[in-house]
Amino acid sequence: MVCRIHFTVEDLARTRVAESPSPLLELGAAVRTLQQRNHPVRFGAWRRRALAGLRPTDRMVIDLVPAGGWAPTFLTSSGAGSPKELLEQARATPRSHIRKDLAHVAEWQPLPSWAHHLADDPDLLRQLYDSLDHVCAVLLSPHWTHITDEAAADRGIRMRQALTGGMGRLMASLHPRRIRWNPPVLEVAMLSGLDGDVHLEGRGLLLVPSVFGAETPTIDLDAEPQPVLRYPAGHDRSSGATPLFALSAQPAPPGARSPLTSLLGETRAAVLHTIAEHPGCSTKELAAFTGIAPSSASEHATTLRTAGLVDTVRHRNTALHNATALGVALLESPAGLGS
């Protein structure tokens, strides 16, 4: 499904990159990522710790924010502020808004049976908000500084793109696999099933970078004062500025080499890490992601494949690389966390 966002000159003039990530929007992305199995190196250790820290009652939040599909906006709003401020705002949501929000979600997918009584049951609603607070404390709050740092780095990338290549370059690089700039239309491939045309009518678009939203851009058309597009932070591979989100890793001392780097060499370790982070990448993409020549990328991938750390399949004339279970285990081990 593709959502086509139409821009006028006024819309382009008012389109901007958010100064900071949106806590509830990011929390929604984190809840979805928790339920998935993608990006095992980046999120694997975080998932294990998060699942160990959650309570049975936190299932309420997970049931309302599934891995795919729709989620109620009062739990995943795109408002700005601190996590604490946004959680308090969620608690103040009018019941009429909750009722309307849930009815909209029910048009697209089944709701948990208890959710049908949510707006009319104060005790049930309090349980949901208490669960939301705890889920945020486990999944998001410990890493909020890291998340804001990555968002700030991504914002710097976007500003440079706009200065050197205009808004066209910025739009085209947000997430090439799912977001395509076909002037004057931004085409966004949506996993939620949203399909159709959106006219911004001079309001422009707020672009919000997301660390946990690694693969799935989302759109909040009802956000004020302008619609919001959440996109994955750090998807400007050509600049070489690709923030990695290995939450389990501890910073290495200056100049120190991780055991994995000592074992494989710096470039080969980076190649293995990149393949794990970009399953199914081609040799050309691997070279671009790591900043090395295609011939070197091919050579390193071959060595890793011989060692059983990488598996390569061919699609027509293109070699596609994936990390094996052994390769992922090596990256997630204490030896690999500092790479």
Image (tube, rainbow, N blue to C red):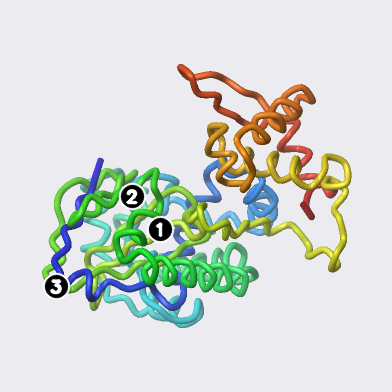
Q: Is residue 75 visible?
A: no
Q: In what element is the residue under mark 1?
A: strand
Residue 242 seen in this snapshot: yes
- Residue type (three-letter) at the residue carrying disc 3: Gly
Marked residue nearer the N-terminal end (3 or 2): 2
**Which type of secondary structure does the marked residue at label 2 adopt?**
strand
Horizontally, residue 145 falls left or right of residue 99, namely right
Give SS at disc 3.
loop
Of the pair 290 and 58, the residue shown nearer to us:
290
Q: Which residue is mark 3?
A: 202
Residue kind at label 2, given as amino acid type: Ile
Q: If you read the primary sequence from the N terminus, does the residue marked by circle 2 or circle 1 appear first?
A: 2
Q: CA distance from mark 2 to mark 1?
A: 9 Å
Q: Which mark is residue 179?
A: 2
Q: Residues within 10 Å of mark 2 (few under 14, many from 20)?
A: many
Closer to the camera in the image, 27 or 52 = 27
CB under 8 Å between discs 2 and 1: yes
Instruction: Give me the residue at 55% from left, 24% from top.
Output: 319
